[in-house]
Amino acid sequence: MNVIAGDNVFALGAVLCALAWLGFWIDGTHIGKKVAGVVWVLSGAMLLSNVGVIPFTSGVYDFVGGTLVPLAIPMLLFKADLRRIFKESGVVLITFSIASTAVVIGAVLGFYLLDLGKSGTRVAGVYASGWIGGAVNFLAVSQAVGLTPEEFSSAMGAGSPVSNIALLLLVLIPSTPWLVRFVPSRIIRDAKTVRQNETADRIVAPLMPGHIIGVFAASFAICAVSNYLAVNHFGAQYGILLISVLSLALANLIPDRMAAVNGDFELGVILMYVFFAAVGAGTNASAFLVTAMHFFFYGLFIILVHFIIVLAAAKVLKLDLADVIIGSGAALVGPAVTAAIATSQGWRNLVTPGILCGILGYAVGTFIGVALTAFLS
């Protein structure tokens, strides 16, 4: 029995927003310079759910992920100048390719090193697809390779905490001094400088109610059109892609007008911090104990191999660490969460490349997963 029930909308809303506030507050303190506020949001939410204060599942979390996150995507993209983005951040596609290859290598090595049982070849393909594409690919490959409902439940139950460990690592890396020295980053350095000037910027450009409600209206309209097109013509899995396309079209058709809008990106950041709180709240740290432990350790092995290969490649190729994190995130946690990572770190120019690469993962993940299962068989 939880202290706050899953249907207590207002209490859960208060907790999620309070955790998001905590993240913003920590970002402005000395602690935030060491460990980003979003890490504390995730950790705080995980702690509250795992000690029984809030539930692991709730319609409130579903609303945050299914409604607020799509609504935040246009807000984060309204000032996305594609010419500048591709000039400064085209390397994210390279890092995404390296990250996807690293997942496959980890899946193959782990398959031969660990005893995964009779379903090992199929789970390998399912995990590879999920950490190159996403949950949609995970489900598609599990059906394509014939996982039984019991095997699917075990694989999903063991894989979920691994995905959250990967997310924690992604948001911790920019705050880890020796990694920043190992793979230097101009983007991370510049973002810190920008954050130091944020207070002055807010004084110069106060929040304007007319702009805020206009941003909400435009975001709702884009999501409505995208949802209609996805459901009726393209498939629900392409919803984020259509939202991104329409948002980018608006941003680049009237760039001067969108540049004059105030508060759009900040609103998107707020919604993404609430999303991080919901993600943390839904993480059952002990779930894998009642599922297949060998699947959990297999997934963890894939993630660790992934990070070792990606960071080593970044060092050799002299890639920017921020580009590497976003390329890696696009594969491991998908476009929406990658956008949240870029947003929380202040890497505005990496939001769009992260989303686009994450959507590319949707497109190729299923094929890679099925092919890997066939190869290992």
Image (tube, rainbow, N blue to C red):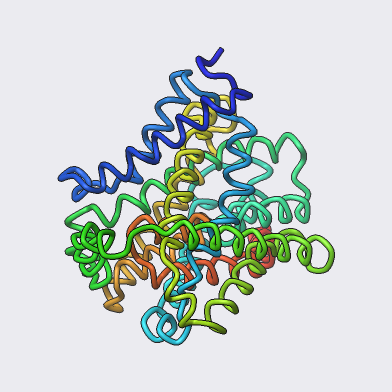
Q: Position of residue 65 (x, y in %)?
A: 59, 46
Nearest the viewer among 46 and 344 is 344
Q: In the rendered picture of this protein, how many numbered marks are placed on residues?
A: 0
Looking at the image, residue 188 lies above or below residue 7: below
For this view, does 171 lie left or right of residue 283? left
- Residue at screen point 19% across, 65% down: 193
Q: Which residue is at 53% across, 70% downward?
A: 357
Specify whether 230 is left or right of 337. Answer: right
Residue at 57% in and 58% down: 216
Q: Quadrant of the N terminus?
A: top right
The quadrant holding residue 23 is top left
- In the rendered structure, the answer to whether residue 237 lies left or right of residue 95 reads right
Residue 159: % across, % down: 55, 42
Q: Is 123 located above or below residue 201 in the figure?
A: above
Q: Nearer the viewer, residue 31 or 228?
A: 228
Q: Position of residue 169 (x, y in %)?
A: 36, 49
Q: Nearer the viewer, residue 87 or 193?
A: 193
Q: Quadrant of the C terminus?
A: bottom right
Residue with the most extreme top position: 1
Q: Nearer the viewer, residue 183 or 58?
A: 58
Q: Who's the residue at 50% across and 71% down the image?
A: 78
Residue 129 x %, y %: 62, 58
